[in-house]
Amino acid sequence: MTSTPFACIVCPYKYSPDVLISYLLNSTYSQSEKNSTFARFFGMGIFRKSKKEDSERAVSLHDIAWRRFRGNVQGMVGLTYVGLVLVVAVLGYLITPDHSPYCNHQQLEIALQKPGFSVKLLEVKSQHDVPRRGLLGRMLFGQPDIYNTVPVDEVEYAGDSVRVKLFEQPYHEVFAKADLSERVFREQTFVLGTDRYGRDVLSQLMIGARVSLSVGFLSIFIALVIGIAVGAAAGYYRGKVDDVLTFIINVVWSIPTLLLVFAINFALGKGFWKIFLAIGLTMWVDIARVVRGQFMSLREQDFVESGKALGFSDFRIIFKHILPNITGTIIVIAASNFSSAILMEAGLSFLGFGVQPPTPSWGMMMKENYAYIVLDKAYLALVPGVAIMLLVLSFMLIGNALRDSMDVRS
């Protein structure tokens, strides 16, 4: 043991902590020598965790599910597309070519122009003052037109006046420079062309995404609140409570969804704020049935019995112990119902029972332009239809990816 202190100090990683302990317990060495050697061991990191041990940490179920979701190519493609549409919907009028409220700037002179059409727009001062909105106001509600625009083919300057040739017209008009903006005119390109009212189709499509996502989020939120409350009460309490709530669920389930939406829509009236309420009040049944079945199976588990034995209230057991265990199932069914809500809103708008003009909606764009399908302007109805299809498909892919990533059996 006489060589142990020196050997441990020179090459400490060659010896195990047991050698150090036996050395410290040996009475041959003084206390100062023991303290010095003990400090050397700690200074050289003998008792520190290795890099491998530091890298090993507990991984939650959410991390595992997210890792599986990222490995699903289809789910990530759907999530990327939904994220892109969400960004467009949030920014709204800040990125649309037409910044006017509802993107409703009508110019009949350039109606039904094909995609990629460009034109010069003469900017004429408005006869009344138009207030300028702040950044948030422009993003949410748009900016009313400060100038009236006149489509022109040619612009000629003559002193204090400007002589222009009107778009596709054989005659000219003269405007005073004082009545025009500082830049006189601007050139605008309509990427997706114009509709029969001369409005920019791309701007209408971009703001229509806001309507579809808003209806989807709000209607699913209403359906989740009602469905979880009804399903949790029926599955947890059972007995007469379950009988009454199940009877209500079956009655609502037996009524055709579209017919029920029409009935609620007629009772509440038309409008943007009525449509998501009508859809939400019809989609809670699916969620309630699934939540009820999950609660009936989980209420017999040991952790629920332990909570009752500890005196926890029913509210705490339901919302803090049982409900977190079925979050994955609720997320999957919510993603599926989200796509159904978008399709329902588009169908109602197409039939005239949904969002009303001038609010742009993908379903309304199809309604206004479906007659052009047999003509050479079929893209006016196909573009919003493809947008609806891609958004619904994306949510279905996200739902399938969530189902696979949250499958505990795998």
Image (cartoon, grey):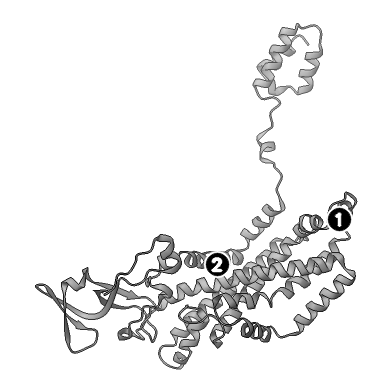
Q: Residues within 10 Å of mark 1 (few under 14, many from 20)?
A: some
Q: Residue at x 71, y 85 (%)?
A: 256
**How far from the left and from the top, in percent, is residue 311?**
87, 50
Secondary element type, mark 2: helix
As drawn, 81 above or below 164: above
Q: Is residue 6 visible?
A: no
As drawn, 342 above or below 92: below
Q: Residue at x 90, y 70 (%)?
A: 239
Q: Is residue 136 visible?
A: yes
Between discs 2 and 1, the one toward the N terminus:
2
As drawn, 231 above or below 112: above
218 relative to 14 in the view: left or right: left
Q: Residue at x 67, y 19 (%)?
A: 11
For the residues labelled 2 and 1, the Cα–Cα distance comes to: 38 Å
Residue at the limit of the structure toward the front, as seen here: 128
Closer to us: 408 or 45: 408
Q: Which image quadrant is residue 190 in?
A: bottom left
Closer to us: 13 or 135: 135
Secondary element type, mark 1: helix
**How far from the left and from the top, in percent, is residue 405?**
69, 61
Residue beneath label 2, please?
82
Residue beneath label 1, please?
304
Name the image quarter holding the C terminus.
bottom right
Q: Which mark is residue 38?
A: none
Tell me which amino acid carries mark 1: Val
Closer to us: 354 or 266: 266
Q: Residues within 10 Å of mark 2 (few under 14, many from 20)?
A: many
Name the image quarter holding the N terminus.
top right
165 relative to 84 in the view: left or right: left
159 relative to 378 in the view: left or right: left
